[in-house]
């Protein structure tokens, strides 16, 4: 057996710790380089482009607090989002009508509670279904020119009621 003085023991432990730290640093450095180079290879053909502001929508007030499903529904002609505010309003816009959404944009407002789900028909670009916490599903037939004035429940093409929970 070898006996070490306290100072010798401390020096030996410090040397062992330093050696372990160097080895760990080398492993981390080499794995980081490998990961970095694999990312560079994976995305080497990816190029960014500046967003054309004439093809974007902004100033939208999307109600993101209640939906159980998607916050956006799209068809070949329109997109729809639950609108922030009282009741269950939905904003429906033409895909061709990009730009700033004005405060005066007409809304489809036929529900008494927040809209939690919405979807366009896969067979008819003008048919929109909205489901709400008021336990109703409403079907809306959006005209080709879009929603040009505020709509209420009288404008819905159909109302499916009788659900026990929000839909």
Image (cartoon, rainbow, N blue to C red):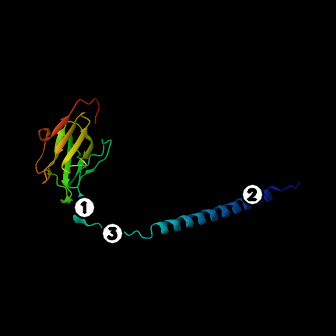
> Which badge, 1 or 2, comes first in the chain's sequence?
2
Instruction: Say whether residue 86 is visible.
Output: no
User: Can you tell which mark lies on residue 56?
Assistant: 1
User: Can you tell which mark lies on residue 13?
Assistant: 2
Nearer to us of marks 1 and 2 is 1
- The residues tagged by marks 1 and 2 sit, at their Cα atoms, a distance apart of 62 Å
Pointer 3 residue:
49
Pointers 1 and 2 in contact (C-beta within 8 Å) = no
Q: Position of 28 compared to 93: left or right?
A: right
- How busy is the neighbourhood of tag 2: few (under 14 within 10 Å), some, or many (20 plus)? few
- The residues tagged by marks 3 and 1 sit, at their Cα atoms, a distance apart of 14 Å
Pointers 3 and 1 in contact (C-beta within 8 Å) = no
Nearer to us of marks 2 and 3 is 3
Percent coordinates x, y for residue 106 in the rendering: 14, 49
Q: Position of 4 compared to 103: left or right?
A: right
Dot 1 lies on which element?
loop
Instruction: Say whether residue 128 is visible.
Output: yes
At a point 26% along the width and 35% down the height, the residue shown is 133
> Which badge, 3 or 1, comes first in the chain's sequence?
3
Image quadrant of residue 13?
bottom right
Percent coordinates x, y for residue 72 in the rendering: 28, 50
Percent coordinates x, y for residue 140 in the rendering: 17, 43
> Which badge, 2 or 3, comes first in the chain's sequence?
2
- Between residue 87 and residue 44, name the one nearer to us: 44
Dot 3 lies on which element?
loop
């Amino acid at each position: 057996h070898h006996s070490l003085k306290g100072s010798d023991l401390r020096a030996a432990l410090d040397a062992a710790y330093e050696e372990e730290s160097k080895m760990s640093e080398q492993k981390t450095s080499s794995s980081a380089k490998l990961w970095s180079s694999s990312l560079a290879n994976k995305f080497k053909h990816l190029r960014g482009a500046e967003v054309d502001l004439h093809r974007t929508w902004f100033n939208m007030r999307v109600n993101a607090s209640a939906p159980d499903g998607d916050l956006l529904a799209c068809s070949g002609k329109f997109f729809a989002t639950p609108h922030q505010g009282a009741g269950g309003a939905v904003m429906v816009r033409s895909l061709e009508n990009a730009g700033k959404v004005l405060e005066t944009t007409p809304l489809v407002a036929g529900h008494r509670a927040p809209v939690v789900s919405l979807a366009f028909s896969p067979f008819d670009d003008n048919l929109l279904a909205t489901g709400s916490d008021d336990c109703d599903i409403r079907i809306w037939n959006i005209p080709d020119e879009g929603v040009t004035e505020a709509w209420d429940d009288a404008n819905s093409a159909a109302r499916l009621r009788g659900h026990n929970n929000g839909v």
